[in-house]
Amino acid sequence: MTLLLAIVTGILFTAGFYLVLRRSLVKVIFGLMFLGHAANLLIFNIGRLTKGAPAFILEGNQTAVEPYAEPIPQALILTAIVIGFGVQAFAIVLFKKAYQMIGSDDIHSLKSTDRIA
Amino acid sequence: MTKFDIELLVLLPILLPLAFAIVMLFAWNNLQFQRVMNLVAGSVGFIVSIVLFSTIYVNGIQVVAIGGWKIPYGIVLVADNFSAIMVLMSGLMGFAVAFYSIVTVNKKNEQHFYYPLLQILLMGVNGAFLTGDMFNLYVWFEVMLISSFVLLALGGKQEQLEGAVKYVTLNLISSMIFLSAVGILYGLTGTLNMADLAVKVQLVENQGLVTVVAMMFLVSFGIKSAVFPLFSWLPASYHTPPVAVSALFAGLLTKVGVYTMYRVFTLIFDINNEFIGTVILIIAGFTMLTGVLGAAAQNDFRRILSFHIVSQVGYMVMALGLMTAFSFAAGIFYIVYHIITKTNLFFISGIVEKIKGTYNLDTLGGLFKKYPSVSLLFLISAFTLSGIPPFAGFWAKFTVALAGFCIEQYLIVGLSLFVGLLTLYSMTKIWNYAFWQDEKQESEMEREFYKIPIQRKYLLYSPSIFMTVVILLLSLFAGSAFDFAVLTGEQLANPQYYINAVLGGK
């Protein structure tokens, strides 16, 4: 399972960076989403996977007994997903607005900021 | 002060902007109230940052465990000398920008939550300066980024949107790399507390992987602090938003990246690692040079200044790359002087725009004859930025170069001096075109400017006058300021101080 997830993470990173380098604004957004998912999966995987053992302290015990899943990576991912969701929603609106104003989704047409006045 | 007071004090730079932002949101349709609240927030924030600074100066490093969790399990806030300096700077910025915003930000932008966003941005910046937890740092980065995204696009002009697309894309990629690096670091060490990381990273068997993570942090913070070759978002976006936003971004945002770079590479990763030091120095050299050459080609007031940010970040990164206690001190002094000077230059560019209606150097002119006081303000900041002797910039550049000489890095020192010369060239260019040359014709805008009541004009000038006074004070008392920077440099060069303060002396 760890290996499978590692491969999936790799594919997501590859696809993400490839899409970010494309000229179409839509593809850039998809690239950003893939990169976000890749980072989340990476954290999930690197926190060592434990199957079917939630991070609970059983009743009557003072500490958790092995095996239990590590709670921190899950907490981190949850935070990262929420933040990623907000930021991506903003990015989509921004890109749409930019597309409407410029009339093209080709990144090479976003040149007015680089022109020397 | 009791322990509780101090803990509250460390939290205040984060809590106050949040509280003020919430209050402002409740009065969303009452602009006058928001303006006043923003002034109050700026002033209170400035006072709090001064009190925090003096407390840290007297009492040493302060650690707050949020929610009473046992260190290193919960999130901690750590205020050491470096954090205190940076929070002081952000308080100063918040104060000056609050006053500057009233005259320069137009009503439409104000209605679109300009003031609450400003406070949230300051909260994110202060949080990033104070946190002692890697993942928490990521969260503060995002708080800061999302409000900066909106501030940058506020107004929705075409060039703003284009700039924002580049800014958003590159900064999101940077955040993802940062997040992945934090994840890997956690996988290697099982902790996120920076002080705990500093101890445990040394014990990791696979030191090769640690270097990889270090490089991931370097790339991520490199994008945020706009170093070569990752700076392209900065000159594409910083000249587009309302000038008050430009000034705040120019002063604070890239410096957050630089701050985290200093923090991570002094505390967590071994500062005696030759490889990391060399990489940072090479990057610093290229950053200085490309930034200043980019500026030389530009013909727009704000774009020249934007490219200069890149070049100046090069100096700060160079001071980090030299990796001695003295070079850290020089770097910190450089950051402080740069924040103040750069913000003031953007303030002045805004004043010029208010008078003439343009940032384009070709159509500007005749300012020296008509507005000698504005010209004087510019001249002081320009001299400071290019490092002319009596001013703070000279001491900053001098100490950075001295730090380089001490460990015989002559190439980078030579380059930094050459870049200083080119900086003087671009400042002369602005001076010649905008202030010195004869006025071509009086623009429509300028006649409008005459009609502005005198009180508003003073309100427009006052933040810049205030910043100029701060520059002069920093220049006059450069000795005492640098003494404190040396203490801070010592603290950074010996991570044991930080680690003992957080984990308890063992």
Image (cartoon, helix red, strand yellow):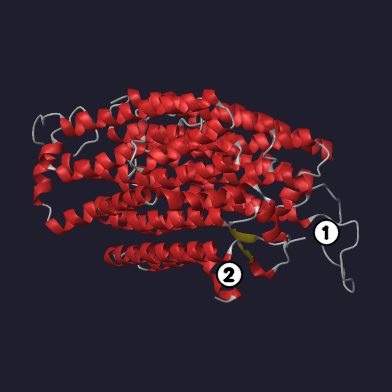
Residue B148 percent coordinates (x, y):
44, 48
Q: CA distance from mark 2 to mark 1?
A: 35 Å
Seen in the picture, residue B377 relative to B284 is either above or below; the reply is below
* Discs 2 and 1 carry the same chain letter: no
- A72 left or right of B128? right
Quadrant where the C terminus of chain B is found in the figure: bottom right
Label for residue A54?
Answer: 1
Label 1 is found on which chain of the structure?
Answer: A
- Mark 1: give few (<14), some (14-19) or many (20+) Cα within 10 Å: few
- Residue at 87 percent of width and 64 percent of height: A64
Disc number lying in front (2 or 1): 2
- Residue at 38 percent of width and 53 percent of height: B93
Seen in the picture, residue B398 relative to B46 is either above or below; the reply is above
- B240 left or right of B91? left
- Mark 2: give few (<14), some (14-19) or many (20+) Cα within 10 Å: some
The residue at which mark 2 appears reads as B7
Seen in the picture, residue B453 relative to A41 is either above or below; the reply is below
- B1 left or right of B421? right
Amino acid found under the numbered disc labelled 1: Pro
- Residue at 72 percent of width and 48 percent of height: B198
Residue B52 percent coordinates (x, y):
49, 64
> Is residue A29 visible in this depiction of the protein?
no
Quadrant where the N terminus of chain B is found in the figure: bottom right
Q: Secondary structure at mark 2?
A: helix
Q: Secondary structure at mark 1?
A: loop
Q: Which of the 4 image quarters holds residue B380?
A: top left
Residue B109 percent coordinates (x, y):
31, 52
For this orientation, the residue located farthest to the bottom is B2
Seen in the picture, residue B64 relative to B366 is either above or below; the reply is below
